[in-house]
Amino acid sequence: MKPWKMIVALLVLLAGLMAGALAWEGHRRFTAPGPLAQPATVIIPKGSGTELIAQSLEGAGVISSRLVFALGVKLRHATLKAGEYVFPAHVSAEEAMRIIAEGKVVIHKLTVAEGLTVRQVLELVKEADFLTGPITRKVPEGWLLPETWHMTRDEVRDEVIGRMEKAMRQTVDVLWMARAPGLPLKSKEEALILASMVERESALEAERPRVAAVFYNRMARHMRLQSDPTVIYGVSEGLGELDHPLTRAELQTNHPWNTYIVDGLPKTPIANPGRASIEAVLHPARSEELYFVADGTGGHAFARTLDEHNSNVARWRQIEKAAK
């Protein structure tokens, strides 16, 4: 072999060895545990390219080399997705790439408790700093479904509220179709109004059908419903809570929700009822009870006659007095 050919062959061999060594080193660095000492959250904005993502990860200490990460992404033909990601401690660049490529974004939870008013729910949504956009959607009272909602960063607030309303309407539609026969309700709206009253009156799911029966029995006898939470709703202008005990003067306030003054149901729901309260109204207990009052245990004492009720009220007042 001529000397120059031997030199060329040696150079090619050396280049191959160097390329192999570089490839091996690149693979080692791409798959080795990273420098992150503890889990870290990184937000990747929409429209971010590989280089910008690599820069963000390096800046957050997730990876040690943006070049190694970018090259690994290119060689694997990975498509990286925008979103909010949590990277575990010592995550490798390869695993970081996989997390982003698979879109394993952070899922945020927002719990809407049963019995909150629309005003209260909108405030929760407003305060959720992982959501975006103003709240412009108008929602009638009672039509937001209480549950734990799952969402990702930068979802639009109006769209989240729309999901809650759609879910409530679907829930009411399904439950209304399966309602017990003979109920004196003219519409799904009336069912929701009564369900919101039951929701606010009792925190015990087991006794809600009984509470619903009391309201039905009073309606059948043309008795006013006399529900304190309806008065509170009107006095608080839809907030649903007062910073003081309900007063005698407030019980006499003339507004469309005061069931001590108006006949039948209040003007609108007074809160967003949960599924159990809606079911209680559509499948009430069978009873002749007309009254209930707190019993000091978190539940209520029920009565068929005014004398029985007055005895229960006296007992409750003794409990209140002893607790002071």
Image (tube, rainbow, N blue to C red):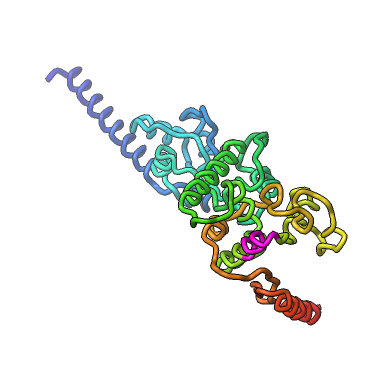
Q: In which quarter of the image is the C terminus?
A: bottom right
Q: Is 21 colored magenta in this rendering?
A: no
x, y percent for residue 270: 69, 52
Q: Does the magenta stretch include residue 220?
A: yes
Place residue 204 in its image quadrant: bottom right
Q: Looking at the picture, tell me which residue is in the foreground, 191 or 44.
A: 191
Q: Which residue is drawn at 49% across and 56% down?
A: 181
* Residue extent of the magenta highlight: 214-222
Q: Is residue 176 above or below residue 281?
A: above
Along the viewing direction, whichever of 112 and 40 lies nearer the viewer? 112
Q: Which of 257 and 147 is in front in this view?
A: 257
Outermost residue on the right side: it is: 249
The spot of residue 7 in percent (x, y) is 22, 22
Q: Residue furthest front?
A: 221
Q: Quadrant of residue 132?
A: top right
> Which residue lies at the image location 43% right of the left edge and 33% below the top edge?
80
x, y percentage for residue 298?
A: 65, 72
Q: In which quarter of the image is residue 6?
A: top left
Q: What secondary structure predominates along the stretch shown in magenta?
A: helix
In the picture, which quadrant includes the N terminus?
top left
